[in-house]
Image (cartoon, helix red, strand yellow):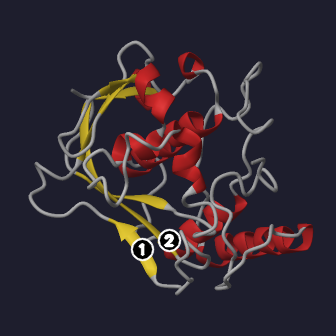
Amino acid sequence: MDPPSLAQTYMRGPLVVQSHGTPLSKEELAACKQELEAIKKEFGLVEPDRAFMDEKDVEWRFGGPPDYTIANLFFLKGKTKNHGAGSLEMIVENLVKTWEMERSHKLDPNKHMSVDPQRFHISANGGAKFDNDGANKIGNYNVLLQSVAPELYDVDRINWEQSHEKFHSAFAAFPWELLEVFSPPPRVSFSWRHWGHMTGSYEGQTPCDQRGHRRPRGPRRAHRDVWLLRGGGERQAPAH
């Protein structure tokens, strides 16, 4: 199903709790933009810097580069860290956000600029390791949810499109932030958190506005991401 706009490509849930969300109107999106600018001005915050969104000859999944107004608004309102400009934490956070943008929106994985397509590998929680093409084929959700019990989420029966359709109406946004960097380049390890408020429905479950989040816990060695940075942080591949 085509998204209602480039601001609601994946997360299409309502901004506030209601059982049946409708696409944001132009007026509502404009109000989100105004609120975003007001928050930036009042608290001195900056939006994430996702690189490579202005590249030429890109085949975009939804016809054009995404509009991150809603995602950035919820990110700034809910994040717990304020990394300094130019810090390693901010560089890595923006790098991961750039990678997610390219993986989710640029159809040709061999033209992704945030990774080295020949060296890229990804795995989660000791699960299967995927190369660039393999990860792109099944999608980020299916890569990262490999260890989930099949009765809750069966990665073998859910394709890329279905993996996103499951969450379309549940959240207005599902922000990601980097929490802490544990080691310097070239091998960078870090902790992170994902969160979102359930304002819409999920597989028949009514909205509750409770916050759902994913945050690695336990020994740092077992529950953190490791990325290999090179080229000044502009290209990277998870270490393996």
Q: Amino acid at mark 1?
A: Gly
Left or right of 90 in this view: 129 = left
- In percent of width and height, residue 10 lies at 64, 53
Q: Are marks 1 and 2 in contact (CB under 8 Å)?
A: yes
Residue depicted at x 78% and y 67%: 33
The residue identified by callout 2 is: 196
Mark 2: give few (<14), some (14-19) or many (20+) Cα within 10 Å: many
Can the viewer see residue 234 in this picture? no
Quadrant for the C terminus in the image? top left
Residue depicted at x 60% and y 36%: 51
Q: What's the mark number on residue 27? A: none
- In percent of width and height, residue 32 lies at 76, 72
Mark 1: give few (<14), some (14-19) or many (20+) Cα within 10 Å: few
Q: Is residue 219 above or below residue 96?
A: below
Can the viewer see residue 23 in this picture? yes
Q: Is residue 3 above or below residue 34?
A: above
Left or right of 157 in this view: 64 = right
The residue identified by callout 1 is: 212
